[in-house]
Image: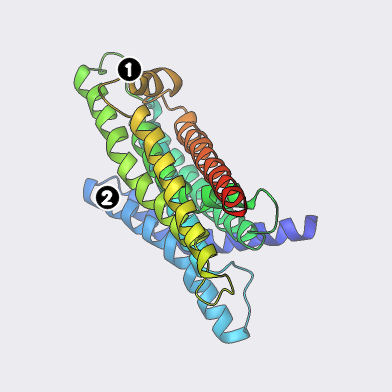
Amino acid sequence: MRNKLAGRIEHVIWLLLWIIPIPFGAFSTDRMGLVTISLLLFLLLSIFVPAVFRYRQVKKKGESPYVRIPFILYGGFVGMFIGLGILNGVMAFPIWKIYAGRLVLYTIWMIFLVFLQYGFANLFSYWHERRRSFWYSEFLDPVLYSLPLPCSLLGMFLFPAVSTTDLSGQILMGVAIIMSSMVYLFAVFVLATFAFYFYPKKNSSMTLRMHILSFVRIFVMGVVWIFINVMVFNTKTAIMGTIVFTLMPVLQNNFLVFFSPFVYEAIVITIAVAVSNIVILAFRDSMEG
């Protein structure tokens, strides 16, 4: 176990040696244009260097210690959105105004982000190898397929702290608009996951009746998911304001903004899947009766 962990750390160190030096050099000039280039270059390298490593190793040796490229990309983007939110929050610290402090924080942030992206990529790969393996997979798999990317993107906007003196009605309204708009992104990911995960494959031996039941099940869980979210995020009700400004510590450098939407949507997805199961069971019983 220790050798395996040491090997993983070695893999990340190799990534750091290829990713960090040039962005660090550009940032250390402290010139606005080069600082911007440093960030953009680092983000690009953090996504594509692991993918290139794997591609070249597989082409040369037929195998690679790095996970498959889809997981590298998915984990990379999830980690990137979380990292950008954290960086924006760190930039509000007083030490960021000091050159040496800024350089140290930026370097630590780059190292942290590479580790985070590598960790997410491996976690997604580990889960994918075990999907559909357990009785709770039909509840867990849709959550892990659909939520990490939109939740990390939402958290990127909601994480950075805003001082109470800068907190205005316009900022609060902006947060509410972001939350409302992100519902559509969640809808794309969640509803697409319902459709692709639960509908049987074309080569399935299921009968036409079972295919129809599968379609009904997807329709039911989609309707339930939409209904709950419409009720919660309806701007004409007080529910949305309670969730956004009471249950979620937005604009406070609080990591709950990444977890709270994930937990909430995971509960909604679980309810939607459970309701669809109940409907299908009732429908089957009525047909058999």
**Extreme residue in the left direction:** 170
Circle on res. 96: none
Please name the amino acid that badge 2 sits on.
Thr
**Real-space CA distance between mark 1 and mark 2, rounded to the nearest whole angstrom:** 40 Å
Q: Residue at x 23, y 29 (%)?
A: 174
Is residue 43 in view from this perspective? yes
Residue at mark 1: 238
In the image, 182: left or right of 139? left
Which image quarter: residue 274? top right
Rendered location of residue 66, percent (x, y)? 59, 67
Q: Residue at x 25, y 18 (%)?
A: 166
- Of residues 246 and 215, the one nearer the viewer is 215
Residue at mark 2: 36
Q: Residue at x 48, y 47 (%)?
A: 148
Q: Residues within 10 Å of mark 1 (few under 14, many from 20)?
A: few
Frontmost of labels 1 and 2 is 1
- Of residues 51 and 102, the one nearer the viewer is 51
Rendered location of residue 156, percent (x, y)? 37, 39
